[in-house]
Image (tube, helix red, strand yellow):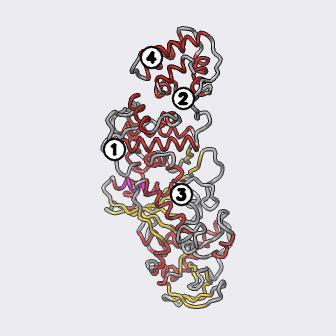
Amino acid sequence: MVHWADYMAEKIIREKGDKEFYVVESGITPSGYVHIGNFRELFTTYIVGHALEDRGKKVRHIHMWDDYDRFRKVPKNVPKEWQEYLTMPVSEVPDPWGCHESYADHFRELFEEEVEKLGIAVDFLRASELYKSGEYANDVRIALEKRDKIMEILNRFRDMAKQPHLPEDWQPVQIYCPSCRKEAQFVEWNGEWEIRYRCIHCESEGVTDIRDGNVKLRWRVDWPMRWAHFNVDFEPAGKDHLAAGSGYETGIEIIKAVYGKEPPMPLMYEFVGIKGQKGKMSGSKGNVILLSDLYEVLEPGVIRFLYARHRPNKEIKIDLELGLLNLYDEFDKVERLYFGVEEAKNPEEGEELKRTYELSMPSIPERLIAQAPFRFLVVLVQMPHLGDDKIINVLKEQGHIPTDLEKEDLERIKLRIKLAKNWVEKYAPEGVKFELQEKLPIVEMSEDIKEALEELAEWIERKERFTVDELNTVIFDAAKKRGIPSKKYFKVLYSLFIGKERGPRLAPFLASLDREFVIKRLRLES
């Protein structure tokens, strides 16, 4: 079974021609927090570029910050006073939180830092800099020259959508007033580089040169212009941008009729959400989960794997509760498959999973780095007597990690310990949380259960070393030979140690506790 990114890479080569160099693009307006849903576009672009590189191709991944878009509305989490900046470029609106140079930078810089942690190499470009440097000047002029053709295309799509035509004085550009930086009115173009404008905000009038960067293309023209300018071969988009009459559909015609080039190959991706959360995430509304939030509980490799394993046309619902434990289990299994430590039951499925892992990793380690089982770490981090070093010793003693650890192993284990602590604190359901009972709790039990506990205590006392499997066998045998129902027996054991009727897997849990403490508790000694 071919991975979807490999399928797209082959399709790009087939339809765009077998070239040495390809350009893939993603982008967004930094008008709010760039969340895990927005990240899907960047990652989809990245992984297809990765698949192209695996075929010996050179790839440039552009992520365009549309920070020259105008500030259209004041979000709920921004002071109402920011209304005075409406229609200015978002790259020139002050940062309401006072920690960055602009409103756009507040969101842009955070996302760039988050992506860097994933090890993904991206060429981040800013529309504001490209317009102001004059790089787009000739493209803007071409759009003005072919204004009538652009209007004809857009009006044709408006007819199909039963919308009114654009007004006769419509222009493919918008102008930022050189004086107050708010959107000004277009008055006249001289057919070359100068545009006369009138600003209703500061009442200034004048002429601006297109090459000075105060003139910007409107969105439905800007997008295809960008495809043409950078010779983009591939760009994914959300289903809203690929719907009938969308910016992509009009862009196909505009890039051909106005700029004489072919559009990039698209790929529709579905939304990303959090399990149990209703509604679509919105960066301006603030109801979002950021990559930074995922970093608190997930390794970078697990985040990449989460996106890589889902086909783009399938919605991703991230489960930050118990489903997160399953995600770690799945990732660790696939990693073991890749390094040949484990074999897949279905060879074909195993090959696809190994390819998913390969595509998820910007650089693959030379060997399997020690995997501390996250599910067990969740138990260990809740034990007050265990610090990081003692947790590592428990993992060694129970055979979860090698006894000889290198620097990379220790770094990964300590990272997972930190992530497990965060998960218990922020997302773990109450059923997973527990507190070790330091004082002997009052627990009602029958004489046969007391006898089983004493047998278990004696066995642990006799054994200086034992495996978890051996302990597990003794726990069950002590109850079985007395005909004690497992449910009744385990209820007593959990109550004695954590004050709850259920808890983590008992044998690994007891094996991780202080030996003398376990013996005393089983003997019901204070």
Q: Tell me the CA gap for discs 1 and 2.
A: 30 Å
Which residue is disc 2 drawn over? 504
Vertically, is 369 above or below 462?
A: below
Is there a contact, CB below 8 Å, between mark 3 and mark 1? no
Query: Judging from the image, what secondary structure is the residue with disc 3 in?
Result: helix
Type of amino acid under label 3 = Asn
**Mark 1 surroundings: few (<14), some (14-19) or many (≥20) residues within 10 A:** few
Q: Residue at x 43, y 64 (%)?
A: 62
Q: Residue at x 60, y 44 (%)?
A: 275
Q: Pointer 3 and pointer 2: residues touching (CB < 8 Å)?
A: no
Badge 2 crowding class, 10 Å Cα cut-off, few under 14, some 14 to 19, many 20 or more, is: some
Disc 2 on helix, strand or loop? loop
Q: Position of residue 192 (x, y in %)?
A: 48, 89
Q: Residues within 10 Å of mark 4 (few under 14, many from 20)?
A: some
Q: Does the rendering let one see residue 153? A: no
Q: Which mark is residue 38?
A: 3
- Mark 3 or 1, closer to the camera: 1
Residue at numbered disc 1: 407
Q: Nearer the viewer, residue 302 or 135?
A: 302
* Range shown magenta: 45-52
Q: In which image quadrant can residue 233 be found? A: bottom left
Please report whichever mark, 1 or 2, sits nearer to the chain's N-terminal start. 1
**Dominant SS in magenta:** helix
For the residues bearing labels 3 and 4, Cβ distance under 8 angstroms: no
Proximity of marks 4 and 1: CB atoms separated by less than 8 Å: no
Give whichever of discs 3 and 4 has the lower sequence position: 3
Question: Disc 4 marks which residue?
Answer: 461
